[in-house]
Amino acid sequence: MVHVLVVGGGIAGLWTAVKAADAGHTVELVTKTELAEGNTRYAQGGIAAALFPDDSAERHFADTIEAGAGLADPVAVRVLVDEGPARVRDLIRFGVAFDRDESGLSRGLEAAHSRARIVHAGGDSTGAAIEAALVATVRRRAVRIDEHTMLADLLVEGGRVVGARLLTAAGEFVERRADSVVLATGGTGCLYRHTTNPAVATGDGVAAAWRAGAAVADLEFTQFHPTALAAPGTPLISEAVRGEGAVLRDRDGDRFMLAVDPRAELAPRDVVARAVWRRMQAQHGEPVRLDATALGAAFLARRFPGLDEACRTAGYEWGRESVPITPAAHYAMGGVVTDLDGRTSLPGLWAVGETARTGVHGANRLASNSLLEAAVFADRAARSLGEAGGAAASIPNSGSTVRHAVADAGPDGAPDAASGVVHAATASNGHPVAATGATEPVDRAALQELMWTHVGLERDAAGLAEASDRLAAWRAPEVHDRRTAEDRNLLELARLTVAAALARRESRGAHFRTDAPAAASVAPTAAPVPMPAVASAPAPASAPEREAA
């Protein structure tokens, strides 16, 4: 049995903590705010799995591969769809009351799914229901829980992660030693001005892992959800609303998606989001409208109670009028590279949930696969925690090796044909883009605006270069509280993301370059491909001693 430190309190972190405790490990769980806060709580759409007689794992596999735009790892996807139904049944045992009808579990259809296979709880409150059930479950286990405690850095000794340096709400640094550290800190939505993510989504785990020398990949692939309410807080309007029949209209009332894709509003998210973005640009920034009036006010209030309240709070009667929507940063397909059991390239370090890059999503995530991925791979990670070693044999330990885009991606900067992955250009010190001579303190609001403008739904070399130059001029703050720790992480992740987007000189999935609108040819793979780092810092003797970029 081992001592496990889990960082993060969403579905992935809670699942890992519960299963690790059940296996007899000593488990400590730390979370930046309250245990129930995080992206999981805000998930509306549901969880996808092949649970019904007219569906199959093969269909779910095919839908996921197609959505991934040529980069989804088929072996990882096979694990997802084969093990997914069992994990949904686990959730039921944990106490999640999924919605039911006269035939059993109720199900819905979402974009790019060939079958109605998404199960929900509380209508549009699936994430909150899952979070509540898992929080109650973990509190019944012998798990030490430290709330309002943020990850500052990983402790690395002799090339192995041996714990973490944590920052308390009082601004005190504490070190926690552990045999195994599991990162489950969620995504990076706060890189952007418009996001559906809560304020905690600042990529803490990905940034800390990169500083420690772990491999990260696919950071150029940020999924922008096509329908966030154009109101303060940009609340998400679930894909399930369009699955029930809502449509998108421009300011003239035209249903413009009919001319974009034969699947119209149910095309993959990247297709719909870009179409919405382009129509907004044609309308000089005016939002397009989501029209759900045909569904009726009574149905909307019953099926989507949370959204109904959000629309009313914003001043809209969405059962009687269309509502303004905008795309918003929603999900990070990239992250810390792991094998199928959550192991990273650093011994002693695991990553699960949105923090991890498992290969399941490729260049574009299929709707409602995120909660499923978190459960499936957290379950596998928990089972592997007591095994000897602790580093993924199939993932190279980056150590002090820094990979460069030109060398790895070919003369034109196209993706490596064997893996479809590019590696960000880095400075000689291991940091993406030159940061020497940075004099201005980083401004979070300006960074978010910069990323939204130049590293958003559509990108080009000139805009990315401008973003790179601006980011290089900012210096990271000295870390002494949550705000400064988050700002350091956001600056590092912004630089990594821009470097990755510059290196990928093609358009694929959620990464669209107007100066390279076609996808390059990527050879299909039949087995997991070792994924080198987008950019790696030399592994320090002790991560907390290392200066930020």
Image (cartoon, rainbow, N blue to C red):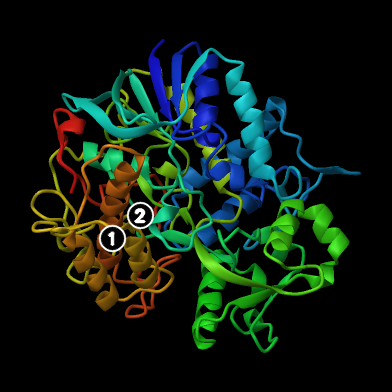
Left or right placement of residue 292 versus residue 514 in this view: right
Mark seen at residue 218: 2
- Quadrant of the rendered image containing residue 174: top left
x and y percentages locating residue 198 in the rendered image? 51, 49
x and y percentages locating residue 16 in the rendered image? 50, 27
Which comes before the other along the chain, label 2 or label 1?
A: 2
x and y percentages locating residue 51 in the rendered image? 72, 42
Left or right placement of residue 47 versus residue 296 in this view: left
x and y percentages locating residue 297 in the rendered image? 85, 64
Q: In front: 312, or 406? A: 312
Q: What separation in Å lies between label 2 and label 1 (alpha carbons)?
A: 7 Å
Query: What's under tag 1, amino acid-wise?
Result: Ala
Residue in the image at 47% along x and 27% along y: 147
Crowding at dot 1, Cα within 10 Å, few <14 / some 14-19 / many 20+, comes out as many
Left or right placement of residue 71 versus residue 283 in this view: left
* Relative to 281, residue 188 above or below: above
Image quadrant in which the N terminus is located: top left
Label 2 close to label 1 by CB (< 8 Å): yes
Mark seen at residue 175: none
Label 1, secondary structure: give it: helix
